[in-house]
Image (tube, rainbow, N blue to C red):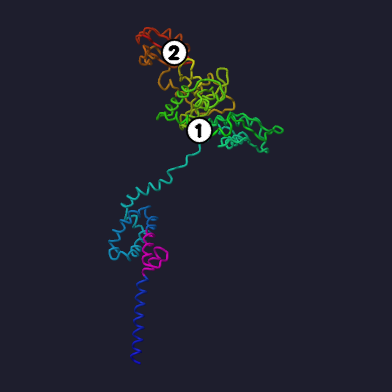
């Protein structure tokens, strides 16, 4: 009996001893895991994996972003200095206790300034990579900013329905707004001046009206609806081919290249598409509005703001282009008058004119509110220093002669004096002697003068 009692007592004592050992070995690990991860795990392996993952998250959030990529490599040397050397498997729990103070206390920022510098090179691109692709601000067409009320309402309906992939055959208006024929006229005039890409519509169509209020508009297009997409592709291909040659550099250089390219490609000729960039750039035939909208479209696709206006010039209906060289500098260009196919030359007299200069023989439609920006020294001949007036002598023109070609030398310039014939009579002998010419002649187109010297 005593022996049995002794055996029972001994057994109970051993059980109590074993239980106390198990509890003491589990308690620290579970409490540390909870402190770092706030997750439950059934095995030591699971806890270690979670702890490593969570440590990365904690470091990523508090220490400089993504410093964990390298702090994990540096963290091992750091933690090896303390607990990591003692036991790598289970000390992952203990480095976590050091990791947690590191993330909350500032030692991390001070202890690892150098590692921050390295990860920052990787982290910064990552952080800047997200904001970098900023969505470009929408550029509102200038003409649209000059109208309001019902005209603006109709304009925006045209943007929605006529610029659609498949243009609408009917545009219905809110009758309560009392849209009038004048509203429709203003809207379509300004809309077309802003949108040279809309070559399939020239403003034609019919409308339904009741007591002076327009209920609906039915646009008439230059192509069948199913053909418009392929025509767009044709024009886009022509535009892209031209833009490949646009020089790098100033807006002036780019605009001059496109001015000359349009004048070179297009013949002044009436036809079905003569008022459109499609006629000018795909078919090679256009009149003033085709020249102007083709130039406008090429400028816009090259990143240069432009606008087509219309009115009268030289006693006939006409169109020309407003070009923004920058936000504060805008000029006026008329490629139609610069394209002198009959003379076999391309002029630059109407390139980048000031408002005062172009106002001499261009009268804009009253529907157009011209921009306030203006400049008077961006014309081609002003920029290259080839403007001659009554105060200039023969030496000014002598300096403008180019190299000899086929036995001839020419000087081209803009004459801004009162009477070039009188100026030439006065100075021709000095020019003759100065360049050693056998004969001199000149021709004028507008203000542009070409003096030719032959041996």
Q: Magenta span covers which residues?
A: 28-55
Q: Does 76 appear above or below 327?
A: below
Instruction: Examine the residues drawn in magenta and state their main secondary structure.
Output: helix
**Residue 395 in magenta stretch:** no
Label 2: which secondary element: loop
User: Can residue 333 be seen by looking at this rendering?
Assistant: yes
Q: From the viewer's perspective, is residue 135 above or below residue 431?
A: below
Residue on which the image places disc 1: 233
User: Which residue shows up at 68% across the image and 37% down it?
Assistant: 175
Q: Is residue 92 left or right of residue 234?
A: left
Task: Look at 34% across and 92% down and name the residue there.
Answer: 2
Do the CB atoms of the residues marked 1 and 2 lie less than 8 Å apart? no
Q: Mark 1 or mark 2: which is in front? A: 1
Residue occupied by mark 2: 390
Q: Secondary structure at mark 1?
A: helix
Q: Is residue 104 visible?
A: no
> Residue 56 sits in which quadrant?
bottom left
Which one is in front, 191 or 371? 191
Q: Would you call the spot at circle 1 few (<14 residues within 10 Å), some (14-19), or many (20 or more)?
A: few
The label on residue 68 is: none
Q: Quadrant of residue 192?
A: top right
Position of 411 compared to 363: left or right? left
Q: Quadrant of the C terminus?
A: top left
């Amino acid at each position: 009996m005593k022996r049995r009692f002794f055996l029972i007592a001994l057994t109970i004592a051993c059980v109590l001893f074993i239980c106390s050992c198990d509890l003491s070995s589990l308690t620290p690990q579970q409490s540390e895991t909870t402190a770092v991860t706030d997750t439950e795990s059934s095995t030591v392996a699971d806890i270690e994996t979670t702890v490593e993952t969570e440590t990365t998250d904690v470091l990523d959030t508090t220490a400089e972003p993504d410093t964990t990529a390298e702090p994990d490599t540096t963290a091992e040397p750091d933690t090896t200095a303390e607990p990591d050397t003692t036991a790598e498997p289970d000390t992952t729990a203990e480095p976590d206790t050091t990791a947690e103070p590191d993330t909350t206390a500032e030692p991390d920022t001070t202890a690892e300034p150098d590692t921050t510098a390295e990860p920052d090179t990787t982290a910064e691109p990552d952080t800047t990579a997200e904001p970098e692709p900023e969505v470009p601000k929408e550029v509102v067409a200038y003409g649209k900013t000059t109208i309001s009320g019902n005209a603006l309402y109709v304009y925006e309906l045209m943007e929605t329905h006529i610029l659609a992939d498949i243009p609408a055959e009917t545009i219905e208006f809110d009758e309560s707004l009392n849209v009038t024929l004048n509203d429709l006229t203003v809207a379509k005039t300004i809309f077309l001046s802003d949108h040279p890409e809309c070559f399939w519509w020239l403003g034609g169509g019919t409308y339904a009206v009741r007591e002076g209020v327009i209920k609906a508009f039915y646009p008439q297009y230059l192509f069948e609806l199913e053909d418009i997409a392929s025509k767009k592709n044709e024009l886009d291909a022509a535009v892209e081919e031209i833009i490949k040659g646009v020089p790098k550099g100033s807006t002036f250089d780019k605009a001059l290249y496109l001015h000359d390219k349009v004048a070179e490609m297009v013949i002044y000729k009436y036809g079905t598409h003569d008022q459109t960039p499609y006629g000018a750039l795909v078919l090679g035939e256009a009149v003033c509005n085709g020249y102007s909208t083709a130039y406008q479209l090429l400028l816009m696709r090259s990143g240069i703001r432009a606008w087509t206006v219309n009115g009268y010039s030289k006693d006939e209906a006409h169109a020309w282009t407003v070009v923004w060289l920058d936000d504060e500098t805008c000029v006026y260009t008329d490629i139609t008058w610069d394209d002198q196919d009959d003379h076999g030359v391309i002029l630059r007299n109407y390139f980048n004119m000031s408002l005062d200069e172009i106002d001499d023989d261009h009268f804009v439609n009253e529907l157009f509110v011209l921009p306030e920006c203006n400049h008077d020294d961006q014309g081609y001949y002003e920029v290259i220093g080839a403007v001659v007036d009554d105060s200039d002598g023969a030496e000014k023109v002598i300096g403008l002669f180019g190299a000899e070609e086929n036995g001839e030398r020419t000087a081209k310039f803009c004459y801004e004096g009162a009477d070039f014939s009188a100026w030439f009579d006065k100075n021709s002998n000095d020019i003759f002697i100065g360049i050693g010419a056998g004969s001199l002649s000149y021709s004028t187109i507008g203000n542009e003068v070409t003096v030719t010297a032959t041996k």
